[in-house]
Amino acid sequence: MGGGATARLVDWQVARRIGARVAGGGPETGRTARARLREDFAEVVPEAEKLITELTGLAIEGPATRPWVMSRAEWVSQNLRGFETILDPFAERVLRGRSGGGPLAGFRRKALATQMGGLLGYLGRRVLGQYDLFLPPDDRDLLYFVGPNVIAVERRFNLVPREFRAWLAFHEVTHRVQFSGVRWLRGHLLGLVNEYLDSIEVDPRRIVETVRRAVEEARRSDGWRGLGFLFLVMTPAQRDIFRRMQALMSLLEGHGNHVMTALSEGRLPTAERMGRVLRERRHGAGVNRMFQKAIGLDVKVRQYDVGERFVAEAVARSGREGFARVWEHPDLLPTLEEIARPEAWVERVTLR
């Protein structure tokens, strides 16, 4: 990995080793099974791209989508590269005026690496597919599919492999179509991420004050619970950015699921069962469910559910052409309140 400002805060090599160790290799698959997995995704991804562009009216710009069937360790490494890219400006601000050295510098770099590697290692055991927003321009046609995880789910729930792979492709290719077909979308989302990172306070005294305020607010009200504990330690400006990001991610994930469901009808006989299995897997139980809440992953899970309800209701009320207005301009994106009340978004957009 690179030698930018983040390298003075995080030991990326340690993060990569720990992430790979926590993720593990996954189930034994065999050379033939891995080859068939690559062949299947090489076939279903182009088919999905054609169907999705026809259904949504969004056009792919640039080369056709390429699937990368990867190991868990490769997924961890690629996502660490993404973190390094997006966090570099933030690291510059943190380190401004500091030498980055001192007796605790090495310990700090390894501690942060352990946390990041451990988190991504856990996620690397569960993620099935991903469109990576932080890829450089030449690689933005790539989609990730974590081979061992796909095969593990197929075996555990006795799914039809070819159908499951096509079903996954419908969702993930939709994300590639969204970011390729809506020219302003990538810049808008990355702008929100950068705006949030720029707002993070690095003064220790102010951090203590923020935590104290968060504790007091938690005692007074439980209105924060739907957005996670981290919402409590945000400033009002950060909360506004966070809510806009949550609304956008709910829209994108919900749209991915809506397209996946629409295209599965009449094509994938086991789609309903696959949907039920994946919903149960996302929500988890026991220790796994507790860990999801601790790291905020339960917020991600809710994005699928509320987003899918929003898109379905918005399409039902305004038709596909009416819903497509959501891609015209950032001002037409739904707010978090409108995600919960699709009729309010339809009414606002209809009046413009």
Image (tube, grey):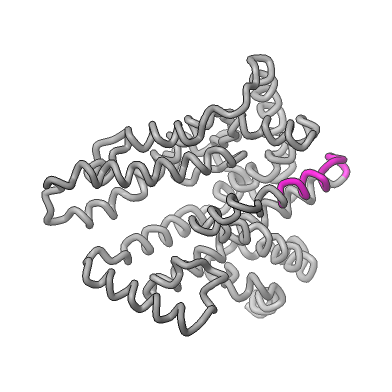
The residue segment tinted magenta is: 266-279
Residue at image x 26%, y 43%?
109
- Name the quadrant containing residue 28: top right
Quadrant that contains the C terminus: bottom right
What is the x, y in percent for residue 294? 50, 58
Q: Is residue 78 above or below residue 85?
A: above
Name the outermost residue toward the front.
286
How many numbered circles are shown?
0
> In the drawing, does residue 265 fall left or right of residue 300?
right
What is the x, y in percent for residue 64? 60, 34
Residue at image x 72%, y 64%?
309
**Front one among 98 and 288:** 288
Viewer can see residue 22: yes
Quadrant that contains the N terminus: top left
Residue at image x 41%, y 58%?
193
Q: Is residue 317 above or below residue 79?
A: below
Viewer can see residue 236: no
Asked whether residue 41 is drawn in magenta, I would say: no
| Secondary structure character of the magenta stretch overall | helix
What is the x, y in percent for residue 240? 45, 73
What is the x, y in percent for residue 5? 23, 45
**Front one among 127 and 57:** 127
